[in-house]
Image (cartoon, coloured by chain):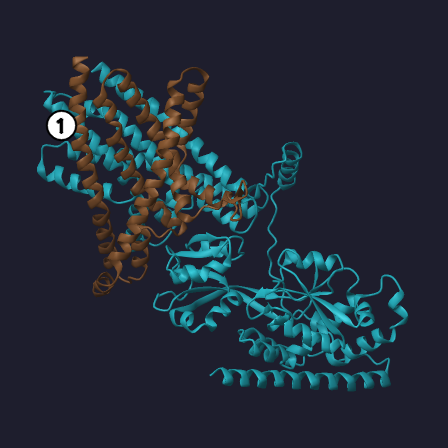
Amino acid sequence: MPSVILSAAKDLMAAGMRSFAALRTTGAVLCVLVGAFSPVRAETPDAALAELLAQARAKVPAACTQPNVDRLIKILCAKKIRVGIRDYYPLFAERKGDKREGYEVDVARAIGRMLGVDVDFVRVNAATRIPLLAEDRIDLAIATMGHNTQRDGQARFIRPHYYRSETTVVGPRELPVASMLDLPGRTVCVTVGNGSNAELVSQGARLMLFDEAGVLPDRLKDQTCTLAAQDDSFFAKYFTDEDFNARFFQKFGFSQVPWGMAVARQGSAELARALDLISQVFHRDGLFIDIGRLHSIRLGFLRQQQEIWRTPECNTDAGTTNPKCILPPLNTALQPTSFAPDVTSLENWVEERTGIDLTLPMLKTAPAWSLFKDGVFYSLVLIAGALAATLAFALVLGAAMGSRSFVLRWPARLLTMALQSSPIVLTLVIAATVAHGLFALSTETVLGAAIAALGLANGSNAGQAIGEAMWSLRAEGVRAGLFGRALSRAATQIVAFLINAAKGTPIASFIGAPELLSSLTDITSFSSGRVTTYSILLIFYTAVVLVVVWLCGKLKQALEHRQAAA
Amino acid sequence: MSGLMELLSGDFLPRFLAGMVVNFEIAAIALVIGLALGLLLAAGRLSGGVAAAITVSIIALMRAAPTFVIMFFLLNAIPRDATLFGVPFALSGVMTVAVSLVPYSAAYVADAGVDSIRHLRAGATHGALLFFPNLTRAFLVLVMSSSVGAAIGVTEGITVILRQADQLPSFDDRLVLFAIGIVLFGIPLQLGFVVMSLFQRRFGRSTVEEEASA
């Protein structure tokens, strides 16, 4: 089997080389023709490229010593192009000793051949690929970089894009999940900072956050994660593994991001134009597809692009600026809040005076601010609801457990025993399952389920204390005002379980209740400042519980005062 | 129901029991750390003066801090490559849950410890010994609370149940599985409470007698 694969790989490489040879020949012929009929304007991308390269080469070596020449001239002078590339991104760019391989590596080599120069690879990562361009330490970045509006201002992206990834949701083959509609109530493992997290949350999925994508396949295998969402280019390698492929399946994809090669924004106009044209020709002639096939990446996008770039409308020297031919960058720009500059000033002020790196992402962009406000509101609703439900269930179950009637007393006792035996997480999940079974999924349904679960779990315990107080009062011969006196006697336990209910409200985020923990988790999934964010969360909940403790203290005093008066 | 039976006849029970061992492990770690910290706080509270006032405030804050939020704070505030005196300090999932339960256990131990020391000073030895059933109660509460680990991927008992439930397409099957989970969690818990209340009743009676004779 390996020899068959090797043979197929060689065939593909040969096909790629043939495509490339044909391209070079075409380019050379066109170059001669363009030169002969100059200054007639080129109409095909091949001719435009040949003309551009011919003009650039004509300036070499005279322009090599001049300052501020375009990077294309510098590359031709140095006879090499410095390409920023990743060291470990399976199938796309991997380094094994001195050997590099992958889709992006071969794309870089093909570009080098088109320009007639050698390729010098420079290691980059997600954090360094744009700074190295700006510092003139690399000429071109081909490094799994999604083209979005935010990065558009930092580098000049080459159009058309050389690949497009999407977030794919992966899970066991037998799991009945086929679209976003199947996600409500399910937990999806994701990485912090993934731009598609917000979309998953908006569809009712619970997120389990991980720092590194590398752990997700293992967490799927050991069943820590039932579903995992990550870039399809990341999972591509794992699906080449027979065992992984037999167990798991890409359920569906969403949130597509075009990947762009990029050059520096300054001093690279001619280089960028040349690369635009090269990319256009590579798509039209199927070279990207050939290279992609060689490295077993998904070819759907590349095939779509080939169709587009073969159309007469796009196959022109102006195709790369035609909005009908090229893809727009992913719009990731977040609307800032009106007070964002003040927040930034505050952050700087705190850092200057204390050295503390304060980051307040929830106050700086409109979506984050909206999530934050909703989170605070729903947290307060949840706490108020949980307190009210605890009190209500305590009174009802207490009266039933203190009743002389067997029919009332035993069901209440059994329910209490079951609730005491169920960890709160399980009680919440049961409530959510029942709620989803009975009602359509909505914020109100989830909140209602969470309030009912917290109220039942704590109310049953408080109710037991009330019931026991009623029986003890009976034993003491008290007959009049029995229930009222029992409330006074059980005041300490009632208050303790009310406080417990308030403390338990953040756990409701586990079933998707949109309270502050959920909101801040969503905010940190697309912004920085995790330490500050979770510190604020801790302070908020501790402060709220302290207020509840104070209020409950007043309630306890009132109940005990009543008992003393009685 | 056949889907449920298939799952249950497989390796569900061994995996669930292994998960419950993790619940007990988390509770034990939280209790041991809480015991050390709680006894220090109890001593501080009984020392009087400013130290006592500060200790009371610390205990109040620890009592008010929700475990679930502390767990997420620890998970997000401590970098994966954090070191303490040059030693890697990143917490595992189990340790993250255990440490997040420490404020509760320490505050509980501090309260129970103060009561015990007061009993001892009053000469009520049996009353002081009520500290141990109280510890058992705290341990059982910690076992139940350790299920919050399900939210961060710790493979404890509830996580095993929820993973199993994900494989069940039928609503009824899921509810039956949850009921089985409650029974399996309930058995050790209710047994623990029975043993504890017997112990407490015995020492409670002795304490009343001791205090009466004193």
Closer to the camera, B114 or A406?
B114
Q: Position of residue B27 (x, y in %)?
A: 32, 41
A44 above or below A498?
below
User: What is the chain identity of the residue bearing mark 1?
Assistant: A
Q: Amino acid at mark 1?
A: Trp
Can see residue B96? Answer: yes
Q: Position of residue A179 (x, y in %)?
A: 42, 65
B11 horizontally vs A9: left or right: left
Q: Which residue appears at 65% of the width and 61% of the height? A: A124
Q: Which element is circle 1 on?
A: helix
Chain that the image shows in cyan: A
A265 horizontally vs A210: left or right: right
Q: Colour of chain B?
A: brown
Closer to the camera, A109 or A427?
A109
Q: How many marks?
A: 1
A92 above or below B184?
below
Closer to the camera, B163 or A200?
B163
Q: Position of residue B202 (x, y in %)?
A: 15, 27
Q: Position of residue A135 (x, y in %)?
A: 75, 57
Quarter of the rendering occupied by the C terminus of chain A: top left
Location of mark 1 (residue): A471
A266 above or below A458?
below
Can see residue B171? Answer: no
Q: Which residue appears at 76% of the width and 80% of the height? A: A43
